[in-house]
Structure formats: C-alpha cells, structure tokens
Amino acid sequence: MTRDRSLDIAVTGISARFPGAADLDAWWTALTEGRVLTSRYEKSDLLAAGVPKDLLDDPDYVPVHGHLPDADRFENVLFGVSPREAEMMDPQHRLMLEAAWAALEDAGVPPRGRGAEREAGTQRTAVFASASGSGYLRAMVASGKLDALTIEDAIHGTEPDFMASLLSYKLDLNGPAVAVQTACSSSLVALHMAVQSLLNGDCDQALVVAAGIPYPQAGHLAVAGGIHSASGECRPFDEKADGVVAGAGVACVVLRRLADAEADGGDPYGVVLGTAINNDGAGKAGYYAPSVGGQEAVIRAALSTADVGGDTIGYLETHGTGTRVGDPIEWSAASAALSGAGAPEGSIAVGAVKANVGHLDNAAGLAALIKALLVVKTGVVPPVAGFTGLNPLLETDGSPLYVPTECGPWTGPEPRRAGVSSFGIGGTNVHVVVEQPPVAPAGPDSGDRARLVLLSAADAEALDRSAARLGARLADGADLTDVAATLATGRAELPERLAVTGRTTAEVARRLTRSTAAVRGSRPAGGPAPVVFAFPGQGTQYPGMALPAAEALPGFPAALEQCLAAFEPALAERMRRALHDPGSPAPDLAATELAQPVLFAFEYAAATALVALGVAPAAVAGHSLGEITAACVAGVFDLADAARLVTVRGQAMQECPQGAMLALGCEEERVRELIAVSGLPGLEPVAVNSPDSCVVAGPVAAVTEFEARLAGRIPVRRLAADRAFHSALVEPALPRLTDTLATLTVHRPSVPFAANVTGRLFPADSDIRPQLFVEQARRTVRFGDALASIADHLPDALVVEVGPGRVLSALAEAAGLSSVPLSPSRTAHPADEVLTALGTLWTRGQPLSPRALCAPGRRRVHLPTYPFAGPRWIAPEAAPSTDASRLVKAGEVVEEAVPVQEPVLTRAAKPAPAPPEDPTALLTRLWTELLGHCDLAAHSDFFDLGGDSLLATRLARRATRELGVRVPVRDLMTARSLSGQAELLTALMTAR
C-alpha cells in the first residue's frame, strides 16, 4: 500500500560546525573513515582557558573534549550587532545566528527579511532553538564586575529564553519563535515541534537550531559511578565503554513541507516521515536514570506516526552515550520496539556519533539527525568509531541491531529509511524516522547560453573567500543555470559584490579565481548613485544588434515589440529584420531612413527594460538622434509621437545631399582655426563632444581634402556616415521637421533632460519648445557641455550608455563621470557583455533584482555558504583570570591589563570636583561604553551602530545622572546622531 506523503517534511538546508572538521563534507568523510575527532588538551592550554590549576592537578581530571575551533569568532557586522553587544553575547547565541544564516543559504532561501521570503514563495519562517546553559554568563557574573544594568544586558544575550526571538529579530522572520529546553534531547524535541508547526499551518518554513558549547572548552573530572569517561574515550555499545566525553558544536536544519519543497525546486537531504516525544515519568530507578519502557514507547509511536514498519528501517542513529548502564537500556528498548514492528534479526546497523565527536549536549540530537540524513542520502553506512567488541551486557539474541565495524554500502530495505533517537536527562525521549530524498525529475538542458553569477559579502575579504569557495565547488561540475538561479534567489544582497558571466561551470570557476575576469563593486552606504541614461546617435548601428539584448536583457523583447508596433507596419517589418538578422544588408541599415528608426527602437526598448528592472534614470541625455530617444524616455514625447518624429527625421535627412564627417582630436577653438585656414567651402564644426574631441562635417570633397591636409598633424578619423549631419547640407530637412512637430504634443519632462543645442540640463517639469528639436537637427551638438552640466548637478552620477557601442561612455569618463556601456562591442558572444553590464550595475548598488537578472533554474542546489571568519569577541568580565587578562577585539590584542595602584584617599585630601564634560565629549564616551565603537563622527547614527531602545534608555539614564538634567528618552531616540543628541543636551542644559 502506498504511503500518504502529504504529511512528509523535507530537510532542505543544513549548516553545522562540529569538532575535528572544517565543514560538513570533511565531517562526513571523517565519519565514514571511523575517525575519533575529540582532542586531548595540553595543560598550558587549559590554564590559559581559565581552568583552575588545582582541578588540573587532580589525578581524576581528563583533559579530553570534542573541541570546536574559533568558537569565539563572530561576524557581528553582518548581523548589525555592536561590538559591546557582541562581547556580552554568549558564543552559543552568536554561532546559532551564523548557523541559521548558513542553513537558509544552503536551502537556497534568502537569509534575511520577510520581503525576501515572500519573493521566494514562503510567508512565515519559524525558529525552534536550543542551547546549553551559559558558562559564559556564569563567568561574567562570577567576576563581580558587572553592574545591575550590565547584568541585564548579559542575560538578554546569554539566557535561552531570548535566543529564538533574537534569531527571528536579526533575520526578520515572523513565524513562531520558541526556545526548547529538555537537556540532551532538546534539539530533536525542537525538530518535533517544528514538524508539528508546519503540519498545523503555523509556518511555511522552520529553522531548528541548537548549540552545545561550554565556556571554557575543557576536559572533565571523572568520578566513580558517574557518566564521564575516565579513559577519555566514548565507546558506545563497546566492551570497554566507561562513559561519555563532552564536545562542542552548533547545527541548524531547515524544514519545509515536502510538497512545497518539490514545487519550489528544492533539493532535500532527506524526508522526515514521523516524530514522537514522551517522558519516562516516575517509572525508573531515579530522576537521572533512563527507562526501557519510555524509550521503547517513543520509537513505536514514531513508527506509527510515520506509517512504516520496523522491517523498512535499515539504520538507527542511537543516543549512544557509551555508559555501562545507559547503552544496554537503549539497546533493549530499540530492539523490542523495532522487532515488535517487524524488523528481522541483525537487519539494522546502529550508529553512535558521540564516539566521533563526543556528547554535544543540546546540539547532540541534531548532530545525530544530520548523520542519519547523510546515511540515507548517500547509501553509505559508517562504522562506530573506535569499536573493539560488543558490550556483554547487551541482549543480542533475536535483536534486529548490529554494530558496523567497517564502512560499507547500504544493505537494508529500499527506500532507505533510518531512525534517530535522543534521550534527555529527566526522561524526555524523542525519536525521528527519516527517509532518503525523492529522486529529482530530469529537467531540460540549459543550453549553451551565458549565465550571470552574483556573489556578495559584508566585506572585501569575505567576498574573496566566497569567490574562492564557489570556484572550488563549481570545478566539480553543476548545472550553471541552477547555480546562477540559486545564488540570485537564495542569498542576501550585501554591500561588497562580485559578478561574473560564463557558459559553463568550469568557465565560471576559472573566472572566479582570476581577479581580472570578474566585476567587483560596492553598494554605496548612502544609496545607489544617480543614473543618467545616455543614448548614442547614428553610426553605432549594425545588423542583428538586438540579438544580444534580446538574449540577456530581461523585458527587452517585449519592450521592442511594443515599440515596433508604434511604427508603420511596412517600416516596422524592415526594422525587425535589421534588428534581429545579422545577415541583413549593412548598406540598407546605413541608410538614414532605416538607421534612425532602428536605433531609436533599440534604445527605447533597452531603456524601458532597464527601468522595469529597477534602474530609473535621474537624468537623460542623447547625442544627435539619441536626443529624441532621451526626450521620449523623459516623457517629452509619448511613444507614438516619437516614432512618427523619428520616421520623418530619417526620411527627410535621407533626401538631403550626401556629405561626410570627420572626428578630430583637438579642442573646438583649434578646429575653427583649422577650418578657417583651410579655405575649404562648407566645412562646419558639428559636434563638440569633449574639450579635445570634435566633429567636422561638410561636402564629401571638402572633408576628404581636409582629412588629407591634417594627416600626421592631429588625430583624425573618418566616420561611417554618408550625410553631413548638423551642417548646412541637412537644412532641406528642416521644414518637414517643423511641420511634423506642429502636429505633435510636447510635454514637460519628468526627469532632467540635457539639450544638444545649449549643452545645458533642463530641470524636470521645464517648458520645452517644439522648435528645439528642429534646431538640434541643424546646430552643433554640444554633448561635452551637456556632460559637464550633468557632472555639475549630479557629480556622483553613473552614466549608462543605452545603445550599441561605448562612444558615449568614453566621453562620460573623460568628463569625470563613471560609466557602464550596456552593449559595448561586437564580440563572439555579445550577450555575455550585456550580462556583464547588468552585473556591473548590480555590483555598484543599483536596485536590479538578481531574481530578474538570472534565468529560473530547475532546482535549488547546495552551494558554499557565507564564509564566516569574524573577529574574536571575549567580554573583559568573562576573560580568564589566571594571568594578565587581555581584551580581544577584531582578532587583535589591543590592550594588556596593567595592575593599577588604587589611590589612597584621606579625609583631608578631598579631591576637587572634575569640570563637567561638554555634551559631545560626554556622548562620545557613553556611546563608546554602550556600543563598543570608538571611531565616531558627528553624523554617526546611534541605531545604525547597533543601538536599540534599551540602550537608549541606559544612555538617557547615564546622561541625566552626569549632567544633572532630565534627558527624555524619546527626544534622545529622535535625535539619533551624535551631533543631534549633543544639540539636544546643550539645549536642555541651557534651559536649566
């Protein structure tokens, strides 16, 4: 009978940091090799960590632990956590934030923001979190150096009550946020609750995150009759088992309903078929003792919920503590439950991850779950690490369980299913049944098309690490469309950015490791730079020029068809052929009557597509014909009127006498002198593009002679034009333009609009004379002056050349403006250049949606997540006191503690009162104490630096006490900046 799969839950993302392995892949390799990953500490290291010397000298002290490296590192800036808050936050809470971020990324879900969640198709993400008791808090409190308010801050950053809501707050998640505390079984109980939340409809996605990181990380004292190993080796179900070894770790899994995950292209690690929890009650030897009945019952309940029999289970990841009493009880309970559910003798391999990494306390259940998921996903069964022989106290007769001693392939029933057990001190038991992930349906081949791969990070160094890690992963091969889409839809958009294009994963991998092959940029802190659309004129067109944009610029094909519909059908068909067919005759496209409408259509469609992607111009400028496009984009003409004007303009100029045009590399005054000296008739300066770039036009013979005379004296270049635009030779076209414009409606521009005739920028809503567009066809194009005017009004502007070529981009750079040509040149793969241009705009902080830029993928693939390597944070109050304590910030020792001789004050030597601080100095000191930031400026924002309402209350309290004047919290919060708050305090003191 087929199971009902409507209640199945997919595990879509995993993030974990466990002892002895750099990442999950390395950890799995170590498990399959049966390696023990715990560490034996040197005495000097334990002394430095703050372990008392008398404890280390105890002969029963065992210096072994599953050590988690860099547990004191934290990317506080990424999460908007101030330095002071980072110091006061328990390392468990810090690493749970990082694990949650990475797990969401691994699931292909943006790790921040409900807006991103809605875009990704989910609505509510829940958090179920668990952490061990805070040794960090105990160390701070034991120091006796925390005042009442500081202790309150420390509690918020360390106690388990606040960790789930902290994750929801920092990641902007609005589903249930619940802290779960049932000792060793906490994280699997949290998983059970998350599954129920999904099935009940309380959320659409759930994070289950747990940490077990003692402070400090150290060994243990083995006591006769206790649970800790005297040998320092955890040997579950082994004849040499003598107890458990502690370890440290953090883990997070992302859950979704299986149907939702499959519909969204997820790539699950496995499927949760059923879960169950219970408690032993009083039916056991004591509070700390386990119960066969409770453990057996919970396994039976989980199988029943999963609607599977024991004969379908091929693997059991046990609680497996390696204790002489606990192991036999667990073995008996599991044997009874599984055999009673139909499991045959010797059919189920057992696993015990504690043999590898030690007991991770509240994170132990998730570690076991992750291992079981990897077993059913890969079909590989690891050995129990360090196993020597079966514990004689185990009841093996008829048991379905056996201990694998070597790594081997799955031999159990199909589909591969496993159970996972976790039992907490006090008797809260939990069991989970998981199954291998469903086979993904084959999708269509993505083809030989360029893809845009986008990466971002909080700082440049992290971006380097991200690029290197992604390059290494892609070298192993993957579908590039899936990779690009996963990164576009499943990552937060952070300030430091990188974009690279390629047609294969191997090509992208190579480019990621070559600094010159990828585009890098930063999102400006003050928001994206204003964009200026620049539209080139005739001479840049070529047959088939729309193909690159049609392939790479989302929205361009539809916008182009909309534009072509505004032209007469016969002309529109000619335009369509010239735009899309590289084989269409080039001489036909050189004709003005076709070239000008084609250029207008391309430019208008590209601009429309860019605006739809989120790049709205702050101003527009066009060169010659491009000015008509600029006017239309600015709203001066509607599309139909602009199409009619461009059609008439092209036809009228086609009927003008032939001419020629010559570009000169010198300033305008020098050009006029050269023309005057030449004595050649009909020559005119028709364009001044920059201080040292002009264009001369006139009769063909005169231009040819002029070119010959200047050869070798100044740079000259003949332009591909058979008309002398903007010279006297186009005057026959002016009456038709005047007549046409008289029938058109000219509107006020919606954005500033640069005019060729004047070289000035007309503000938005200016009155535009129709005659301007007659004059611009005849008079000199003063594009250099227009760029200078733009630079004056928008000095930080980014010029986007919306058209084929990069002529205007070069002019913009010469004018001191940054530029991005949309379609810079005609290469073997011009669509790649369009994608690169779009990626460049994104790297510079323009509000383009990565989802829109990257083609939809078939599946969300698992890619390297954020490369966390933050500064080290140790609160001074919690630092070890065995030697001179050090204040550690940003990974550097910045202050060595120096013994201070306390001053001896006598009654006769009463110190004089210190002069009061001015408000700015006072606030600078208080901000530094409360936020931990030292580099403050007048414009620094209290809340941007990590402040909140609680810290604002403390700030107001301190300022009131030190100034002797009541400082209202609301006013202080409204002022925000350092200078604003200083002005407030000054006003309050003056009023007093």
Image (cartoon, rainbow, N blue to C red):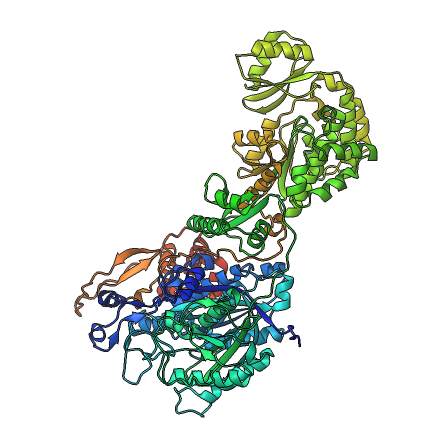
Q: How many marks?
A: 0
State which quarter of the image contains the N terminus.
bottom right
Identify the image quadrant of residue 250: bottom left
603 or 850: nearer the viewer: 850
292 shown above or below 167:
below
Place of residue 929 in the rendered image (x, y in percent of width and height, measured from the top left): 36, 61
Q: Is residue 126 left or right of residue 88?
A: right
Identify the image quadrant of residue 824: top right
Identify the image quadrant of residue 711: top right
682 or 274: nearer the viewer: 274
Name which residue lies at 54% across and 65% down. 269
Place of residue 564 in the rendered image (x, y in percent of width and height, measured from the top left): 77, 38
Q: Is residue 534 left or right of residue 937?
A: right
State which quarter of the image contains the C terminus.
bottom left
Does the rendering let one see residue 953?
A: no
250 or 712: nearer the viewer: 250
643 or 595: nearer the viewer: 595
Name which residue lies at 56% across and 64% down. 268
Q: Is residue 105 left or right of residue 849?
A: left
Place of residue 45 in the rendered image (x, y in percent of width and height, measured from the top left): 25, 65
Does the rendering let one see residue 539?
A: yes
507 shown above or below 63:
above
Place of residue 631 in the rendered image (x, y in percent of width and height, measured from the top left): 70, 35
Q: Is residue 432 left or right of residue 782?
A: left
857 shown above or below 450:
below
